[in-house]
Amino acid sequence: MTNKLLFTNAHLICPEQGLDGNGWLATEGDKITAIGKGDNFSGADKNADLIDCKGDILAPGLVDMRVKSGDPGAEHLETLSSLKEAAAHGGITSFAILPSTEPVIDTAAMIDSLHLRASRIDGPSLYCYGAITKELEDDQMAELGMMAGAGARAFASGSLSVQNAQTMRRIMTYASMLDLPVIHHCEDKSLTEDGDMNEGETSTRLGMLGQPAAAETIILQRDIELAKLTGVHYHAAHISTAGAVAAIRKAKTEGVRITADTAPPYFMLNELAVSSYDAACKLNPPLRTEADRLALLEGLQDGTIDAIASDHVPVNPDMKMQPFTQASTGASGIELLLCMTLRLVRTGTLSLSRAFALISRNPAQILKLEAGTLKPGMPANLVRINPNMSWIIEGRAFKSLSRITPFEGQPAEGKVTGLWIGGAPVARDK
Amino acid sequence: MNSTLAHAPAAQLSGRHLLGIEGLAVPEIQSLLSRSSYFADVITGKTKDDGIADILRGISVVNLFFENSTRTRVSFEVAAKHLGASVLNLSVSGSSVKKGETLIDTAVTLNAMHPDILVVRHRHAGTPLLLSKHVDASVINAGDGRHEHPTQALLDALTIQRKCGQIAGLKIAICGDVANSRVARSNLYLLGALGADVHFVAPSTLLPACIEQFGVPVHTDLEAGIEGADIVMMLRLQTERMQGREIPSQHEYFNLFGLNADKLMRAAPNALVMHPGPMNRGVEIDSVIADDAEKSLIYTQVEMGVAARMACLEGLALKKSEAA
């Protein structure tokens, strides 16, 4: 037994190095040591344990930049252990949790405590965002500087959208001093109050009040102006509208420091999924129109959208078996990030390389993590995937304690066949 | 007396529940209306049929009302009793549900008592559909939020059909708080399916999103909207369902969108006025019009409500017994 591994006959994917083809990869200890194309690995260490990947994809482990944890505060919905296990099941080696826990992650002590507790559990690396405001209320800035010192990877708002422009400006100004991104959920609350779903023909037919797409773009446009004013790295979270894609595309051409992510429900589904009042499809932001969905796909292709995040929200049947209006928003997603993204590869929307930029390299770069790459010298966080293995999505098979998904019963292709974190294999049952 | 109506058989329904007009086929609607008309003849004494009191003998109907309602609940109760069913009224206020028992708990508990038909009213759209997935009983939607109120549309159609002979070709203007109205939606589907020329009239702030995509002409001027209309159906201003501030004041609303004798002159010469009730007198309708027995069908609507609900209860009970 050595601490050296040699992966051969692998379909290597590394967007950073422009790799998309057959090759081999060597690790020693927790680092990647060498990588090469083809099957000529004669230069590699002869003492390494050989792993024949049999043509499977070998890629940097996924980086999920938007995950809500039930722990602390709602451990019946998700614990740190179940979350880590679920992440590993989904091919994720690093993920960042939102500050919307109970209590809110709005102090350095909270971050220290979560880091410590997470370090006692094997599996993917857990990172924290610091809350932008105290208790995630639309008012007083949280102790951003001390949270940065405790290792916050960015400042985020959960489902809070800061309505007061002056508050937002101060947060951005302060965060730019700390050189950390501000991740924001864009929603003009005065326009979404009482709205249960996207506003349009479907909401009218179903007899529900809607949330107009403008609720997202109004706040996003304001934030873009504030990003120009403050120079902060601004990240728009889970964008859902064509208007947001257009606004971000324009801001990028103007040189604004802006990045954005979206989540699988927004590019796989539209508002019609809500037609039978299926509360599993009640999300925040809501599922939008087909035109919005197509605009998101375009944004994923042309680089307007930088990342795909799972937008995992722990929920249980009690929160969903309600009249649609009363049901909670959100769905389990952490185990579906990979297969939903691979579906875009299958349909020809994305190349494999672009797909892994969206779910691994880019989120790692946004959060400045040593992840998302197969470069020698970097941590050996690796995922092996058989892209042709098909399966049916069933919430009850999730490792997450939260098993409600809008994709229930849908076919999926691509399964994780191995996961290594810091060069060590992560035990995963089938 | 119309002999074909006298022999109208029980309504034939394809589904086990009556959750909305959307999704009903025209023959189903017509069979419900024919049977309703027969029941209307019986309850108004035009036809004698002592046998109706045995039609639902042994059938239990539960009125499960999560939202306050007197007229609809009583109408269902009277309808069920005319047909010999046993009726249980349950009013579940929003607060008692909040005490911990979820809607599904309530449904499952009720289900254990094996009712045949559940008549459900709830302030949130889609609730009757949700309940229907958790109970063995047939579910009738007695109004769910802003979604549908199918028996109201049936009684409205029945009222019009009996008064005007037929619905096809009539211009029917539905006026007022369309955004918050389940009656407007159900009537659009039903009257539209039967060939009426349905128009909506509302202030722009009380129109639901993308309503133009429903293929209904929309007017923001009451007089233009009711021009030449055979039927002017006024909607209740749903202050309880409104978000507030959609209109400047009730005073302005009555001025611009309230129906009075002057404005009614723009409609067809023998135009008839309807309202699902309860009315806000002096807000959407002037009392002079509401109480004009020549023009107003408002009390006929209440009468027809019982007949329409009888046909629905019978149709569902029949469907359920076929399935058993």
Image (spheres, rainbow, N blue to C red):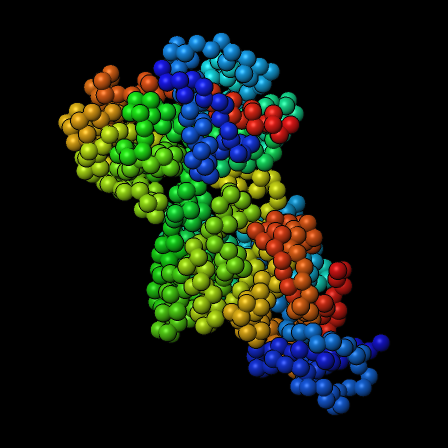
- Along the viewing direction, whichever of B300 and A270 lies nearer the viewer: B300
Q: At 66% from the left edge and 45% from the top edge, which residue is drawn?
A: A76
Q: Position of residue A16 (x, y in %)?
A: 56, 79
Q: At 70% from the left edge and 76% from the top edge, which residue is drawn?
A: A55
Please, is residue A98 above or below residue B279 in the view? Answer: below
- Along the viewing direction, whichever of B226 and B66 lies nearer the viewer: B226
Q: Is residue A286 visible?
A: no
Which quarter of the image is occupied by the C terminus of chain A? bottom right
Q: Residue furthest front?
A: B3
Q: At 54% from the left edge and 34% from the top edge, which residue is drawn?
A: B15
Q: At 74% from the left edge and 66% from the top edge, which residue is drawn?
A: A426
Query: In the image, B106: left or right of A259?
Result: right
Which quarter of the image is occupied by the N terminus of chain A? bottom right
Please, is residue B222 above or below residue B282 in the view? Answer: below
- Along the viewing direction, whichever of B70 and A133 lies nearer the viewer: B70
Query: In the image, B109: left or right of A232?
Result: right
Query: In the image, A252: left or right of A361?
Result: left
Q: Quadrant of residue A319?
A: top right
Query: In the image, B227: left or right of A251?
Result: left
Q: Position of residue A225 (x, y in %)?
A: 34, 64
- Along the viewing direction, whichever of B149 and A102 lies nearer the viewer: B149
Q: Position of residue A320 (x, y in %)?
A: 57, 42
Q: Position of residue B292 (x, y in %)?
A: 22, 17
